[in-house]
Image: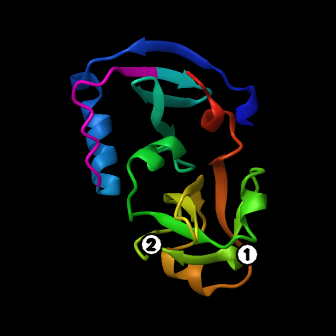
């Protein structure tokens, strides 16, 4: 999927032009980006709009399966701005599958944000080191992700082995 995408139409932007996008992101994840004075760029990456801060892909704007605009941090963004909202925590057995782009099954999930609802964009982290591994759409609510033992928990859209993660800009 993402391997065929390329960064196109990369252009510098002023902070006031992307302030609403950054504000939505800060409110959704409860973080403070503090990008004042940083070099901000926007680019197209496949169907996504990407925000680059000092040449690092920090956030993406994409459409949800229900055709709503969603803004979320990239995996590099989560490394720079750790947060405790919309996370799903997996054990070491799930990591090799996630790193190849597989969807996350509920059997590997050990903890999750209780406020997650079906259809939310969430980030996956490993249970031990709390490092980001993937981003995906939740297929169940937060409590169901923890308690259920069978079925798919997330549909993966961006993972550690993905080109966006490895990108040197």
The circle drawn on residue 113 is 2
The residue that appears at 29% across and 52% down in the rendered structure is 31
Magenta highlight: main SS: loop
The residue tagged 1 is 151
As displayed, is residue 62 above or below residue 157?
A: above
Q: Position of residue 111 (x, y in %)?
A: 53, 77
Magenta segment boundaries in residue numbering: 31-42
**Position above or below: 18 against 116:** above
The answer to whether residue 57 is left or right of residue 93 is left
Q: Is residue 36 magenta?
A: yes
In the image, residue 136 lies at what x, y percent? Answer: 59, 54
Asked whether, in this view, residue 3 is left or right of residue 121, the answer is right
Mark 1–mark 2 Cα distance, whole angstroms, equals 18 Å
User: Callout 1: few (<14), some (14-19), or many (20+) C-alpha neighbours within 10 Å?
Assistant: few
**Residue at image coords 45%, 43%:** 77
Which marked residue is nearer to the observer: mark 1 or mark 2?
Answer: 2
Residue at image point 48% right, 37% down: 60
How was this image coloured? rainbow
Q: Is residue 142 visible?
A: yes
The relative height of residue 83 versus residue 72 in the rendered view (above or below) is: below
Left or right placement of residue 26 versus residue 83 in this view: left
Q: Secondary structure at mark 1?
A: loop
Q: Is residue 81 magenta?
A: no
């Amino acid at each position: 999927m993402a391997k065929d995408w390329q960064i196109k139409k990369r252009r510098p932007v002023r902070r006031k032009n992307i302030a609403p996008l950054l504000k939505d992101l800060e409110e959704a994840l409860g973080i403070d980006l503090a990008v004042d004075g940083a070099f901000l760029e926007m680019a197209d990456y496949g169907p996504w709009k990407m925000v680059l801060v000092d040449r690092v892909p920090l956030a993406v704007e994409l459409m949800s399966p229900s055709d709503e605009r969603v803004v979320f941090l990239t995996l590099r963004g989560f490394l720079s701005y750790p947060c405790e909202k919309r996370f799903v925590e997996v054990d070491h057995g799930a990591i090799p599958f996630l790193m190849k782009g597989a969807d996350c099954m509920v059997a590997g999930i050990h903890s999750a944000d209780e406020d997650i609802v079906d259809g939310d964009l969430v980030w996956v982290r490993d249970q031990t080191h709390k490092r980001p591994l993937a981003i995906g759409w939740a297929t169940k609510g937060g409590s169901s992700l923890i308690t259920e033992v069978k079925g798919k928990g997330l549909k993966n859209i961006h993972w550690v082995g993905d080109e966006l993660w490895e990108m040197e800009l």
